[in-house]
Image (cartoon, coloured by chain):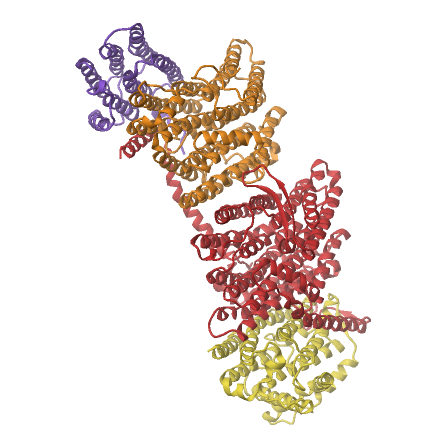
Chain colours: A yellow, B red, C purple, D orange
Amino acid sequence: MTAVLQLLLVVLTAPLLLGVITRTKAIVAGRSGPPLLQAYYDLGKLLRKDTVLSSTTTWVFLAGPAMAVVVPLLASLLLPLAGPRAPLAFTGDLILFVYLFALSRFFTTVAALDTGSAFEGMGVAREVTFAALAEPALFFGLLALARISGSLSLSQLLTVDGNSWHRASAALVLIIASWFIVLLAENSRVPFDDPNTHLELTMIHEVMVLDHSGPAFGLILYGSALKLFVFSALIADVALPRTGNPLADAAATLGAVLGICVVIGLVESSMARLRLVRVPQLLVAASLVAGFAVVLVLR
Amino acid sequence: MSAILVITGVVLCMASGLPSLATRRASAATTVLIVAGGAIGLIGAVLGLIGGTAGLSLPWHIPGGALAIRVDALSAFFAAPVFLLAGAGGLYADRYWPAARMRAGYVRAFFGLMTGALALVMCAANTILFLAAWEIVAVSSFFLIATEHELAESRSAAWIYVTASHVATLALFAIVVLLHGFTHSWAFVPLAPGSGALPAGHALLCLAFIAFGIKAGLMPFHIWLPGAHAAAPSHVSAVMSGVGIKMGVYGLVRLLSLFDAVPSAFGTTLLLAGIASSILGVAFAIAQHDLKRLLAYHSIENIGIIVTGLGIGALAQTHGQPLLAVLGYAGALLHVWNHGLFKALLFLSAGAAIHSAHTREIDRMGGLGRRMPWTAAAFLIGAVAITGLPPLNGFVSEWLLYVAGFTSITCSPHGGPSLLLILVVPALALTGALALACFVKAFGTVFLGVPRSTAAADAREVPATMRAAMAPLILGCAAIGLVPALFGPLLGRAVHAAAPRLPMAATLTALLQPIQTSALIIAGIAIAAVLSLLALTRRAATALTWDCGYAAPTARMQYTASSTARGVVGLFGWAMRPVIHGPRPFTIFPFAAAFESHVPDTVLDRALLPVLRGARWVLGFARYFQHGRMQLYLLYLGVTLVALLAWSAR
Amino acid sequence: MPPIADSILILLLLTNFFILGTANIRSAIRGVALQGLLLGVLPFFVESQATVRLVLLVIATAAIKGAVIPGLLTKALRDVHIRHEVEPYLGFVPTLFLCAAGTALALLFADHLPLAAADRTGLFVPASLATLFSGFLGLTTRRKAISQVTGYLVLENGVYVFGLLLYQSMIVEVGVLLDLLVGIFVMGIVLNHIQREFSSLDTERLSRLRE
Amino acid sequence: MAVYLIIVPLIGALAAFLLPSDRPRPWIVAIVAMLHLALAAVVIANGEVGLASEWLRFDALGRLVLLVVSTLFCICALYCIGYLRLRAERPNRIFCTALLFFLAMTSLVALAQHLTILWVAMEATTLATAVLLYFNQNQRSLEATWKYLMIGSVGIALALLGTLFLAYGARLGIGEPTLLFRDLVKGAAHLPAPWVRTAFVFLLVGYGTKMGLAPLHTWKPDAYGEAPGVVGALLAGGMTTCAFLALLRVYRIADAAGQGVFARQLLVVFGLLSMATAAAFMVGQRDFKRLLAYSSVEHMGILVLGIGIGGAGIFAALLHTVNNALTKGVLFLAAGNIHRAFKSKRLEDVTGALRRLPISAGLFLAGFFAITGSPPFGPFVSELSVLTAAMDAHRYVVGALYLILLAVIFIGMGSTVLAVVQGEPPEDAEGRSFRESAFKTVPIIVSLALVVMMGVWIPGWILTLLHAAARLLGGS
């Protein structure tokens, strides 16, 4: 039951997030901007188009988009979005959660290399390097939460109740901050990357999809929306208190996620992309912040 | 029963080379022998793992020696992959190094000798037999590395290997003798409680760290490993890297099993050394542009992961945290199997690629995926497995270690060893992410894109037997990854044998059950998705790579492996010190410029060799002693005489 | 032990100095011959009554050490017609000083070796050690191969002096003498070859084999 | 019966000397050698004690040494057939005569129970080998011979003085100046300590020179470097073994006289010093025959080290005596072949021997791994036993130094040996003329087979012989 509810929530509302972000940016910039549901329209159009493949590619090239969609869906099943317990919860699922995204990264990057294009190779190099810096931040945060909750399952880990907020509020704030940075990096948002242009040489993530077209490209867009949803939901779970009721929780999660999207929008409209050399520094900073959270909870 | 099967396997493997030595035409017999030996031995090992301990002992006319083997869970656990790889490697070699090729008999003979002796090391119950088998493995590996000794590269690799390995052997001499001093027996007998605290115990552990560290290729003792694995024939590299270096791990585990508790300093050393060599190993791997050197450095990384697990186990056992200890040992031992499987798979498929592209330079390959799809698929599976991604086996063992790390922080009081164990989590995270980067680069550059050389352009798929040799390894990777709970009991027995004083680890199966479920789900959905997408785009139009509108992309425009690695190399510049040749173009219309960069092994090329050269220079002065003048020689005689007379008159 | 024996031993020591001191190889050989004669007659003054064995021993010693071997050497010297300077590495005076020091040391060292009542006053042990030592000096400080042979002879004489303390086991002595004879014979042959190959007996030429 | 062990070779020597033509002489040597080996086998098999006389009789030690020397000599003699055929341009009358004389004298050493006989025999071997060394008759071999002759004679003279000192001590202690080994051991308790100590020093220096313990080893590299490989084998495996036997006899007396501690101290010092010196000179050695000479110095060091450790070390040392002799046979004979084929023994000219003469180079490589203590070869067992003895005697520092020196020696020796056998052979046409005929390879293979046997399955009777000999020396 909760599983279905959760899946529906993720599958249906994910593209909305992109709309929210663009709309926020438009409002800040004083424009009317595209409709909220623009992402849905785009996806529909792309799915109706047909594909052109590069002559150098093999089946690996199509494994990328497939994984890009499959992985966030699976990952969402590890999060307690509706109700106290995630559908796939078990001891140590937090590791699986992180490694699932590594799996999708592997296949998207390999798919990009399959084209033999110089740009996409460049994107791959940056993606894998920066991911290596982002992952410790994620794990430090999880360590701190594990210490606070005394559990190794995301379902307990993320349902932070009042008194642990009382106990370790500072640590929790640090975790949320550092994970927000990771979210921006992983979902190729400003200041790490610019999702609007595909032709920039300083692209990281976006440049890897240059050769995709039609449904495959649609899947990639949809996948990134899902990924954005999952990461936002991760942070939202830390921040939100839980009522036992699935529907209420689902609603709360959705609200929080949309809120996070607004914040992202504000960030994007308030700052420009970083120079590439600065990107690692910001990620290391995120790791340090999370590490500091660990130190706090161990104290 | 199991003992008899195992010893039969050992003998068959060792003898397998003889027909080929006799005549070129008998190479098929060799293949049959070694495959049979591997199969029989594997059955024996599995029986030993399922059933109880079995032993076999014959007299041996050597002081202290006895031809005694004992197949307990630990020995069986380590011997099983040896036999599997022996068979696979032997089958692979049949076409990879055909009888017509130079030194075919030589390679087959020493390969059989090495694999057989390797299995013997894992099962020897008598320390002198252990020592003998150990050294036979070392020497035959030396000969295999030096197969193409006309090449200076092979010569120096073999030389460094044999030197390092002999130092290890001498340390092992001391270990064996010290053990004899403790137990007054030449068998592996548990030491008296508290032996770990004695000075001799400390000496024993230090020597063990050196001897087994060298053999396992643990940083900073790894100096011999990259060159050796690069120079040896690929099926030999597969065995050396997959199970050969596990000799060191086995020795370490076996020794630890004899102690009731080791000083926590030792556990800490293992933990830190393991972490260091896992992170630095993968970092160096990214910087390589020789495919086999790259894989070799990954062996260093994986040994690091294994030793980290052992460190967790030892520390936790010393500090009375059985659950942690079980997790650590289980992770380490399971990773021994996993690394054996996927590293062998990688070496065999890489060997196939090298076989067809006639080069080991990653940047001269490319586009092999279209030309040899099977090999590409095999390498891809190996890559996913070694990167520790679900749903393959690498993930399971790393997951156990992660859980150990997290458990240490949840269920441990303030301070204590837990503080150190926490390091495991970020270290594994970094290692995993870097490994991913490395194998994306390797797989992408070797098998994807367009060929970078004519040789790569007309590469062909390798013969069926070579592919067949990879099949069992792929099955192993998939099986452990998808149904890990099935292996829970075996792993439990091995852990119990490795740490007899720990409560029997029945928890493992229950722990692994959910992993199994989710792994199956992931595999199912992912495969379904990929297949459906393929079906969807079956009739898709094809065109040039778009490349931002550039109409005529050439192979030279592809992103090279080196440039892919550049980011990470930059991050680890403090440890790697890359060497860059070639002028940087600077004018508006730059002249033609060549650019080349490589990363020497810091420990070997920047620390050890200079020191050795210095020592040799110093020793040079001793030569004045032998000056050629007989008067001086007679003077030495007189001086000695007078000195001794003075001593005697005391 | 009659004092004559002691005086003969003193004479022996003096010949050591002479051999080391002289600048002429031929006279050095003469010195060796003299030592041989001294050693030959020595037993008479040690042993109270003369037995056949004793006589035989005396004759053999005197003949071999005093006549045959020096003869061989002189012959060798004549065959290899070379200049007769000794050409030492170490000057004569320091050599003599060293020889004196060695003799003193020998006396000192001999003190802590208990002696049988009969030989209580004997200079045998110190004399033998001192002669041994001067033999070594001859071997190490001389340049020409042939003068090294003389050094070796002096060394052998040192050994022989002590041997006389145990003249009972005469068979030993004879064996030793024969052995020495053969040894010197071979050395003579080798000297000859050296002369032929290098057209000199200068051991400087003989230092090619080295690290 | 035992006396024939000396007489037969002497007759053979005479025959070889009188024989007019060069061609059949090597066969005489080979036949006499095999006869000698057969005799030795018989003597050892029915445990014959030797002559009625007290002066010449076999004890376990003597049997052991006889066995070693006779086997090694037989191997070398068979090799000689091929070797002398290769060097047909040289007259071999003196050479063959000297070889057989050498055999007779070594048998005499093994048989001698009287220290003077022992000494005379040793001196005789010195002279015989001096002749053998000069086989090549060029300036270098002449220099080597001269140095060997002088140093050896001086050393042996010192040994004589030591012997006389013992005799004098016997006269003081026991009454009559006996030099019979048995009497000396029996009456050892009465020997005055100063005489025993002094005598031991002189004998150690004397026979140590013959063994080639550092710093008395200086003649060794020159002699082994310039002599034919077969002579090197006989020196390194045969003569040194005899000298070691002499030293053992003396040690036994000193031990019985209560000077064991003093003696063992000296032996340990000499052992470690020899290993250290060998190590220092092996590193970066450019001449592979001199390399073998230093290896011989090293193993003499290991032998005396074993004795110096005492207890189980004595057994280990005796075992190593056998292994060392046989392995040295392999190394020197194989090196001789390589030297002949390349007409040089310097690394500058010798590379890729495995390509040009696979069998000899392979044997050389195998010999290297054997002598550095790798299984399945004999030295592995004995070198490990020496270490065990040291550790069991709680001589941890000695054990540690021993291991470190072994490591250095392996590195030094390995770099040279591998440079010789591996790589591409130089492109000169001459040297291809060398053919690996059966006579030049089979004896080496036999010797290697024996080394393997000593490492894989030591025959029971050899073990018992070794144990008896060790007990004779007060070991276990």
Quadrant for the C terminus of chain B in the image: top left
Residue D17 as seen in the image, left or right of residue B351: left
Q: Could you say where residue A38 lies in the image, as x and y percent from the top left?
A: 71, 88
Count of numbered tags: 0
D390 lies above or below C9 = below
Residue D330 in view of the camera: no
Q: Measured from the top left, where is residue D237 in percent x and y?
A: 49, 28
Residue at 47% across / 26% down in the picture?
D61
Residue furthest top as drawn: C52
Residue toward you, D450 or B130: B130
Residue B587 shown left or right of residue A257 in the figure: left
Q: Is residue B398 above or below residue A36?
A: above
Q: Would you say C209 lies left or right of C25 here?
A: right
What residue is at 46 percent from the left and 32 percent from the top? D296
Q: Residue most toward the right?
A: B539
Left or right side of D337 for A213 = right
Query: Which quadrant of the structure image shows residue C104?
Result: top left
Instruction: Please determine whether, in this image, residue D82 is positioned above or below residue D377.
Output: above
Q: Position of residue D258 (x, y in %)?
A: 34, 32
Q: Is residue D449 visible?
A: yes
In front here: D328 or A225? Answer: D328
Residue D159, x across and y down, in percent: 35, 24
